[in-house]
Image (cartoon, grey):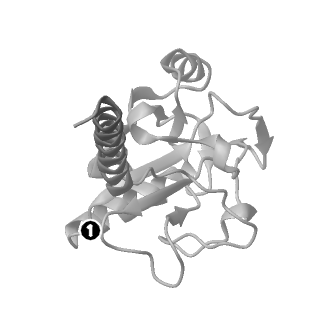
């Protein structure tokens, strides 16, 4: 075999090996689709209670399930409050649904407002995709003096120092968002 033929064969072998590696890698990446939050649009209803989400204050949520979809629309399931988000998850988990990812409003990344309305202290809502973070990255303030759509709001923050500061000003307890229990949500 000539040197030219050997060089061509080696190049073909290396190119073929590189192609197989790229195809194999893209196959691996293609199987694990990244899940991102979406903006909640005007007029969309809460999948837990049916309320129109953009007509109410406070933190909101959305959940993607592994093998199930919400009734009447494409994923994610969307919610008017953190309370409805957790209630829906707990109910669907009892029915065999497995959450793939849940996102909540992240008040560490929003320019939120607290106001008094009818004697109640209310926190602003934020519905754009950029305002959400996965529950695994959040610390929440539960049982504060601040209300959202369903009464006392569970207010999420990606910066735990922000959550501590919020709790110092408005009361409540801080805990990881993943540690919210049925009992806590049931008592709200």
- Towards the viewer: 126 or 113: 126
Image position, residue 93 (x, y; %): 25, 64
1 relative to 163, above or below = below
87 relative to 35, above or below = below
At horizontal 44% and vertical 50% (from top left) the residue drawn is 34
Q: Describe residue 5's horizontal placement relative to residue 113 as left or right.
A: left
Q: Is any atom of residue 104 visible in this view? A: yes
At horizontal 61% and vertical 56% (from top left) the residue drawn is 38
State the image quarter where residue 78 is shown.
Answer: bottom right
Image position, residue 166 (x, y; %): 59, 23
116 relative to 168, above or below = below
At horizontal 47% and vertical 60% (from top left) the residue drawn is 84
- Towards the viewer: 3 or 184: 3
Which image quarter holds the N terminus?
Answer: top left
Residue highlighted by disc 1: 97
Q: Residue furthest bottom?
A: 72
Image position, residue 9 (x, y; %): 29, 40
At horizontal 36% and vertical 46% (from top left) the residue drawn is 19
Q: Is any atom of residue 186 visible in this view? A: no
Secondary structure at badge 1 equals loop
- Towards the viewer: 139 or 75: 75
């Amino acid at each position: 075999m000539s040197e030219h033929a050997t060089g061509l064969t080696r190049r073909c072998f290396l190119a073929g090996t590189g192609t197989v590696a790229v195809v194999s890698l893209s196959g691996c990446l293609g199987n694990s689709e990244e899940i991102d939050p979406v903006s909640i649009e005007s007029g969309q209803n809460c999948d837990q209670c049916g309320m129109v989400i953009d007509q109410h204050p406070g933190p909101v949520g959305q959940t993607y399930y592994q093998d199930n979809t919400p009734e009447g629309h494409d994923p994610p399931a969307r919610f008017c409050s953190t309370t409805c988000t957790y209630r829906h998850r707990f109910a669907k988990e009892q029915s065999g649904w497995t959450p793939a990812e849940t996102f909540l409003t992240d008040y560490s990344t929003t320019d939120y407002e607290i106001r008094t309305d009818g004697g109640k202290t209310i926190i602003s809502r934020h519905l754009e995709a950029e305002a959400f973070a996965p529950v695994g990255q959040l610390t929440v303030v539960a049982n504060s003096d601040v209300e959202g759509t369903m009464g006392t709001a569970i207010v999420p923050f990606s910066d735990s120092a922000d959550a501590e500061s919020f709790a110092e000003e408005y009361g409540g307890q801080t805990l990881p968002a993943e540690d919210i229990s049925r009992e806590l949500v049931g008592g709200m």
